[in-house]
């Protein structure tokens, strides 16, 4: 069994895309991201799907996340989004590991400090990564000689929209909507 198949097997079950949760003190990060990404009046109709997996803070987890994304989207019959969604997930996860996990000094790291969530609504997919950090993403002027620092620019180019949830005691989620339109 491949890592992606293991992650998919242990993924959370499917829920309707219209599902939201905000019970006051504890907000579900993916529902909050969906609320921002899919305004109620947008009218995205069609099939819905939900998959999520917990990820460790190890560098090789990016490969596992891409495989999980490809496996999930293939299962949803959304092969046309595979490449863009895999790159977007890689960039979201890289940023979460760099800024959201390593920036939490003084805390004992959780075995699964990062979550990847995929939410389908019609022909669009919300890709969201949550981390325990409170630092919001900032698009910076790219340094063309640097080997890194262009992740949010890549996300912006490959997605229909992107953003983040308001950081709280549990951290934040950064999300992007990838579309087949």
Image (cartoon, grey):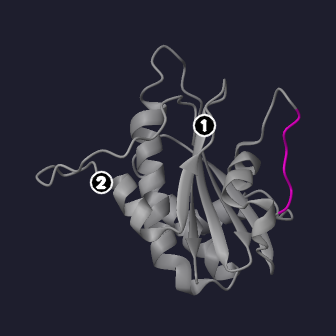
| Structural crowding at the residue carrying mark 2, measured as other residues with C-alpha within 10 Å and reported as few (<14), some (14–19) or many (≥20) | some
- Asked if 98 appears above or below 19 in the picture, the reply is above
Kindly report the distance in space between the C-alpha atoms of the residues bearing marks 2 and 1.
20 Å
Q: Quadrant of residue 40?
A: bottom right
Q: Quadrant of residue 131?
A: top right
Q: Along the line of sight, which residue is nearer the eye, 114 or 58?
A: 114
- Asked if 106 appears above or below 68 in the picture, the reply is above
Tell me which segment is drawn in magenta: 18-23
- Asked if 179 appears above or below 176 in the picture, the reply is below
Q: Along the line of sight, which residue is nearer the eye, 91 or 159?
A: 159
- Please name the residue that numbered disc 2 is placed on: 150
Q: Secondary structure at mark 2?
A: loop
What label does residue 172 carry, if any? 1
Mark 2 vs 1, N-terminal side: 2
* Picture residue at 10% right of the left edge, 52% below the top: 145
- Please state if 142 lies on the left or on the right of 176 as rendered: left
Residue 46 painted magenta: no
* Picture residue at 65% right of the left edge, 27% below the top: 168
Q: Position of residue 59 (x, y in %)?
A: 39, 47
Q: Secondary structure at mark 1?
A: strand
Q: Farthest residue toward the top?
A: 106
Q: Tell me if I can see residue 103 in this picture.
A: yes
Q: Along the line of sight, which residue is nearer the eye, 73 or 43?
A: 43
- Please state if 41 lies on the left or on the right of 136 as rendered: right
Magenta portion: prevailing SS class: loop
């Amino acid at each position: 069994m491949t890592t992606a198949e293991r992650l998919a097997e242990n993924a959370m079950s499917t829920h309707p895309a219209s599902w939201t949760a905000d019970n006051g003190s504890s907000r579900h990060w993916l529902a909050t991201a969906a609320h921002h990404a899919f305004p109620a009046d947008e009218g995205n109709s069609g099939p819905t799907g939900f998959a999520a997996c917990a990820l460790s803070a190890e560098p090789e987890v990016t490969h596992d996340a891409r495989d999980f994304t490809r496996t999930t989207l293939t299962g949803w019959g959304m092969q046309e989004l595979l490449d863009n969604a895999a790159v977007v997930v890689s960039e979201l996860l890289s940023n979460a590991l760099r800024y959201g996990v390593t920036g939490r000094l003084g805390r004992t790291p959780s075995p699964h400090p990062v979550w990847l969530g995929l939410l389908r609504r019609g022909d669009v997919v919300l890709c969201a990564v949550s981390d325990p950090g409170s630092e919001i993403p900032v698009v910076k002027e790219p340094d063309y000689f640097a080997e890194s620092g262009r992740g949010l620019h890549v996300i912006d180019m490959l997605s229909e929209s992107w953003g983040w949830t308001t950081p709280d005691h549990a951290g934040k989620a950064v999300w992007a909507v990838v579309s087949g339109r």
